[in-house]
Image (cartoon, rainbow, N blue to C red):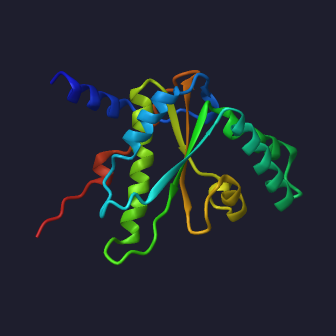
Amino acid sequence: MTGPAHDALDLLSARRSVPANALAEPGPSAAELERILTIAARVPDHGKLAPWRFIVIEGAARKALDLKLAALLKAQQPDLSPARIAAQENNFSASAVVVAVVSTAAPHVKIPEWEQVLSAGAVCMNLTIAANALGYGAQWLSGWAAYDAEACAAIGLTPSEKVAGFLHLGTPKERLPDRPRPDLTEIVTRWSA
């Protein structure tokens, strides 16, 4: 097989995460990021609810958010080590751009909330694949800020929203070897009557 289908299969077969701190400038251009987000939004979405949205964290905003979250973390846990605070001060600014994928899943008369949550997960995966297809590295992370109400508010979420993932994007400084992948004999069963 040759052509676009083969290229897509090669991309999917080789896809791997690149650690956020190994994703340097340049990041995607404005046009590339728009394309990545457009592709990310092309996911299964029962009822066409679009139960997710994006918050793009780029440029100087990355460091500003890092410092804001580090101050919050220090206020919440004054005994944290300086190393842990320093790590937060360089979390979002370590990669070229970060996209917060926000799940807006909510009760609906027809569409199960779980399906809405899964749709947000599919958005995260499409986003990483689109970034990889354009030659960028990506890492899908969460971390304490994804689960802390004050941190989520600082990032711009409403109380009813949740972080599906922080997608770190950039140019890989290095290519790491692939990690071991699941053995299909251990994860595949076949149902029979």
> Is residue 148 placed above or below 26 in the rendered structure?
below
Residue at the image point whose x is 40% and y is 68% from the top: 114
Say if residue 116 shows up in the picture. Answer: yes
Q: What is the total number of numbered labels drawn onto the structure image?
A: 0
> Is residue 84 placed above or below 4 in the rendered structure?
below
Residue at the image point whose x is 40% and y is 43% from the top: 40
Q: Position of residue 174 (x, y in %)?
A: 56, 21
Residue closest to the eye, 62 or 49: 49
Q: In what quadrant of the picture does the C terminus appear?
A: bottom left
Residue at the image point whose x is 68% and y is 64% from the top: 149
Answer with the quarter of the image where residue 152 lies: bottom right
Residue closest to the eye, 116 or 61: 61
Residue closest to the eye, 179 or 8: 8
Q: Residue furthest bottom?
A: 109
In the image, taking residue 19 as reference, residue 103 lies left or right, namely left
In the image, taking residue 183 as reference, residue 153 lies left or right, namely right
Answer with the quarter of the image where residue 120 lies: bottom left
Say if residue 77 shows up in the picture. Answer: no
Q: Position of residue 166 (x, y in %)?
A: 57, 46
Q: Position of residue 27 (x, y in %)?
A: 56, 26
Q: In what quadrant of the picture does the N terminus appear?
A: top left
Residue at the image point whose x is 40% and y is 70% from the top: 113
Q: Position of residue 135 (x, y in %)?
A: 44, 23
